[in-house]
Amino acid sequence: MNKAFINKLSKKGFFHIFFSNVFNKIIQFLTSIVIVKFLTKEEYGIFSYAMNILSLFLILNGLGVTSGFLQFGSESYKDKNLQKSYFKYALTVGILFNFLISFAIFIYSQFFSLPIKGSIVVLKYMSLIPIITIIYELIQTYYRVNLRNKIYSYTYSLNTFLYFILSIIGAYYLKINGIILGRYFAYIIAILFSIWYLKDEIRDIFYIKYPQKNLRVDFFKYSFVSSLTNSISSILYLIDTFLVGLIIKNAEITASYKAATLIPFALNFIPLSVMTFAYPYIVQNNKDKAYLKKYYFKLKKYLLLLNSLISLFLILFAPFIIKIMFRSDYTDSVLPFQILSFGYFIAGSFRIPNGNFIAAIKKLKVNLIVSIISGSANIILDIILIYYYGSTGAAVATVGVFVISSLLSELYLWRYFKK
């Protein structure tokens, strides 16, 4: 990797995105540690299970308009009016759909219960999060498609840092309720900052017409299929915690498993940071197969090397890491943590970059098929392995599904590049 290449990446904002993501993931992890420290193990189990249920409600977040706008906004980079038109349409669809999600969460929390006692009340308090989440995510995507990587990084960091500070204050004084309030205020302040930054463009966005009907149909089709694909993929990270709570019905075991997932899942920011930067460029060159092939294999080479070193370190030092990061009553997290650390190598080196490349070349049906197969396997493996092996079984099931989805996507890309 020569100096000219590094300078090129720097000018395009890669390091702003990457180091911003490093900073944010560290802060997010510290936030999780602070929450664990301020809450009892039972309280943490209640909170993490409610968060998990909220995430399940959000698997169809905005009907996929964030992914749709990332794709169509990047493709219309040179036509700013069309790009703003797509943004307005995405905001309208996303807010309306997420309002329905918020309403569904509120109704569910009023008339139903959850296996982890106390988590249903926490879920009700978080029922408005879907609405502010979609607004925040679409504004961040607007920055990305316009290659404004610096302001994207600053806003992302502002939101994360505010949540960290407000969570500490909230957890200290109000426990779980204070953490929820901290999340609301962090999102709202970050959105207000973004609105102020985009003040010169908001008038144009407000008055611009929606795209033509045929463009809206294409946008919606892409977004919806992307939403289905992403929802099934998201289940891979959510269903295990859900089923641990459902099958075992123990807040402390749920807390231990959730703690084991924090670092391995958080480390996905490394391949995701790379793809956050690369995706608009891949889309802009998605007709040039020679370019894509060269880009793909260069990317894969560096990710394999980096992720293998990270996973090996986590596996070898797992007991020490768990002891330092969490309390002594989380020692039952060590084995699931080691298994999931190996899973990070698979997901970070294959599953995540492959899925992004396939989406960028608009082969969404391939991603959907891979997601359906791996999602089905995930549910079956989780039910069987959690029943017999508890939280360790959940970790094995998750890694097994990572392997399945990675193999399928890898085989498709090899075939695609050979054509």
Image (spheres, helix red, strand yellow):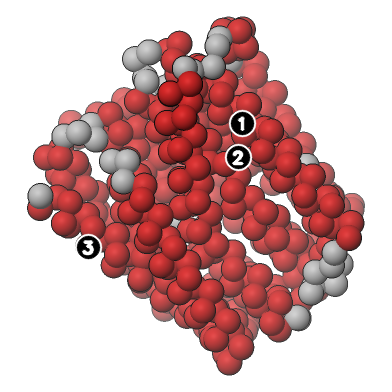
Name the residue tied to disc 3: 411
Name the residue tied to disc 1: 93
Q: Residue flagged by tag 1: what amino acid is it? A: Val
Q: Residue placed at 41% from the left, 76% from the top?
A: 400
Q: Secondary structure at mark 1?
A: helix
Badge 2: residue crowd in 10 Å (few <14, some 14–19, many ≥20): many
Q: Residue placed at 43% from the left, 38% from the top?
A: 222
Q: Which mark is residue 62?
A: 2
Badge 1: residue crowd in 10 Å (few <14, some 14–19, many ≥20): some
Q: Position of residue 96 (x, y in %)?
A: 69, 33
Q: Position of residue 12 (x, y in %)?
A: 32, 27
Q: Is residue 309 visible?
A: no
- Identify which residue, 338 or 123, lies in the foreground: 123
Q: Relative to residue 278, is residue 372 depicted above or below?
A: below
Q: Which mark is residue 337?
A: none
Q: Residue flagged by tag 3: what amino acid is it? A: Leu
Instruction: Quadrant for residue 313, please give it.
Output: bottom left
Of the residues under marks 3 and 2, which one precedes in the sequence? 2
| Disc 3 from disc 2: Cα separation | 31 Å
Of the residues under marks 2 and 1, which one precedes in the sequence? 2
Q: Quadrant of the N terminus?
A: top left
Q: Secondary structure at mark 2?
A: helix
Residue 239 lies left or right of residue 372; in this view the side is right
Q: Residue flagged by tag 2: what amino acid is it? A: Gly
